[in-house]
Amino acid sequence: MDATSRPPSLAGLRRTYQGLPLLEADLEPDPVSQFAVWFGEALDAGLPEPNAMVVATSSAGGRPTARTVLLKGYDENGFVFYTNYESRKGRDLTENPRAGLLFPWHAIRRQVRVEGPVVRLSREESAAYFRSRPYGSRIGAWASRQSAVVHSREELETRYTELTERWPEDPPVPDFWGGFRVVPAEVEFWQGQLDRMHDRLRYRRSGASWVVERLAP
């Protein structure tokens, strides 16, 4: 292997983290309120798509997988995203209804992790969101059998065109599509600091209340 084809030194990609300390006294009383504070700060910092999150799932047999999706809502009940129920993540969550979420806000030296059980949204909630989407996205939900093997790009485009001709204005809500809500059982807020002395504060549900614990970095 010559010098031009050698991979770069990964050790040389090390970054120095430095930020304000994250202290227990600064936290909101519950993790969703704290998430709202940090999410607002991520928006103010101009992060591209701060609602992009990694969703990790596992099959009933324990086979894990992860992918990036967009958070579409959050409140005291949990964190919401939408998908094809017949996709790999949809099948995983049907077999094993638990998930992990990760918000990787590297530019502001923060990340948020959420873990907990997952429930499907009601048909009414999913339909209301579906109807709010742009027309092309609604057709796309019908055109793609998400996670299934397709023979070519042309196959997808042909299917899309056929569906626009079938529903030129208002496609119905697919019965195989809808929302999931991740109900937080644990939420960790990570703030990068110098010398790997990062701040990690975790909310853990205990009955009807939350316990805050500091984790070693």
Image (tube, helix red, strand yellow):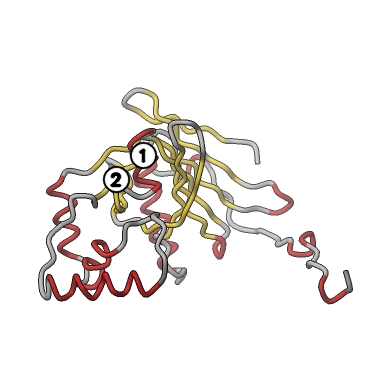
Whether 69 is drawn above or below 164: the answer is: above
The residue most toward the right is 2
10 Å neighbourhood of mark 1: few (<14), some, or many (≥20)?
Answer: many
Left or right position of 1 against 136? right
Left or right position of 180 against 12? left
Left or right position of 42 against 158? right
The answer to whether marks 2 and 1 mark residues whose Cβ atoms lie closer than 8 Å is yes
Q: Secondary structure at mark 1?
A: helix
Q: Nearer the viewer, mark 2 or mark 1?
A: 1
Q: CA distance from mark 2 to mark 1?
A: 9 Å
The N terminus sits in image quarter = bottom right
Nearest to N terminus: mark 2 or mark 1:
1
Q: Secondary structure at mark 2?
A: strand
Q: Which mark is residue 93?
A: 1
10 Å neighbourhood of mark 2: few (<14), some, or many (≥20)?
Answer: many
Residue drawn 24% across the image and 52% down it: 177
The C terminus sits in image quarter = top right
Residue drawn 18% across the image and 74% down it: 164
Q: Which mark is residue 180?
A: 2
Question: Amino acid under label 2?
Answer: Phe
Q: Which mark is residue 106?
A: none
The residue most toward the top is 207
Q: Quadrant of residue 216?
A: top right
Residue drawn 17% across the image and 43% down it: 122
Q: Nearer the viewer, residue 186 or 63?
A: 63
Q: Nearer the viewer, residue 59 or 165?
A: 165
Residue drawn 74% across the image and 51% down it: 195
Q: Quadrant of residue 95?
A: top left
Report x, y in % for residue 65.
50, 45
Report x, y in % for residue 206.
39, 24
Question: Amino acid under label 1?
Answer: Leu
